[in-house]
Image (cartoon, rainbow, N blue to C red):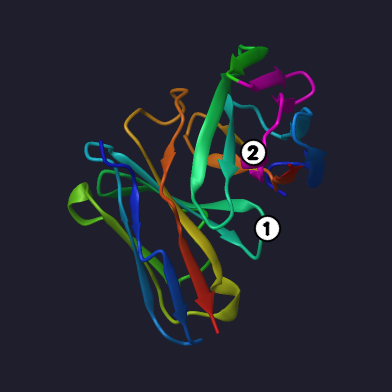
Amino acid sequence: SQQGEEDPQALSIQEGENATMNCSYKTSINNLQWYRQNSGRGLVHLILIRSNEREKHSGRLRVTLDTSKKSSSLLITASRAADTASYFCATSNQGGKLIFGQGTELSVKP
Amino acid sequence: EAGVTQFPSHSVIEKGQTVTLRCDPISGHDNLYWYRRVMGKEIKFLLHFVKESKQDESGMPNNRFLAERTGGTYSTLKVQPAELEDSGVYFCASSQRAPGSGYGYTFGSGTRLTVV
């Protein structure tokens, strides 16, 4: 894989629970982004964290970045059935090309 | 502001046929990217345009794929002849900011290509 690994590959939780997804990468980065893909639909940009940041929040989303371990995590708090989707991390270097992870399939059961 | 538009949303073609995918970026976005997700695997970069020029085409799988962006506006991605392994979802993204500047990309809803 160009990117490394995302884990878990699949995650099933109940509504109201928190969901945590992890991502590791291999190269130096300018920033790391998280995207969501609902079934059959396009990619939606969720949040971006720069390489000099360690944590970022956006609504129910919390992203952490550890550049020494080349890893990031996405936490979705108080999950909803509508959060069911595939979640991808993507890193960007100076050239702007995004390198995606393999994704985590999140299923939130009502 | 209109988003990134891709056409068609779905295409089913036979092996050996030709298919052309189109992407209309957000107006004024110089940077246009093509990506694809094959068989539920990871999303992979295909190429990057800056205006009408190919900045990086290192992800193009082979010479059956031809991308163009005449006039620096919309872009087309032609697959000729299509093979079974080309099936997947093709995404287009555009960005106004310079690459690596630290801003997210706006993706289109994708074209689901099925080669039978």
* Residue visible at 68% across and 43% down in the picture: A101
> Where residue A29 is drawn, which disc sits there?
none
Q: Which of B110 and A66 is in front in this view?
A: B110
Q: Name the residue under label 2.
A: A83
Which image quarter: residue A81?
top right
Amino acid type at mark 1 = Lys
List x then y, in percent, for residue B65.
Answer: 43, 69
Q: Which of A93 and A78 is in front in this view?
A: A78
The magenta stretch is A60-86
- Identify whether B110 is placed above or below A28: below
Q: Mark 1 points at which residue?
A: B41
- Residue A62 magenta-highlighted: yes
Badge 1 crowding class, 10 Å Cα cut-off, few under 14, some 14 to 19, many 20 or more, is few
User: Both on one chain, marks 2 and 1?
Assistant: no
Q: Nearer the viewer, residue B89 or B78?
A: B89
* Residue visible at 66% across and 44% down in the picture: A84
Amino acid type at mark 2 = Asp
Q: Which type of secondary structure does the marked residue at label 2 adopt?
A: helix
List x then y, in percent, for residue B90.
Answer: 48, 59
Judged from this view, the residue extending furthest toward the front is A110
Q: Which type of secondary structure does the marked residue at label 1 adopt?
A: loop
- Residue A22 in the figure: left or right of residue B56: right
Do the CB atoms of the residues marked 2 and 1 lie less than 8 Å apart?
no
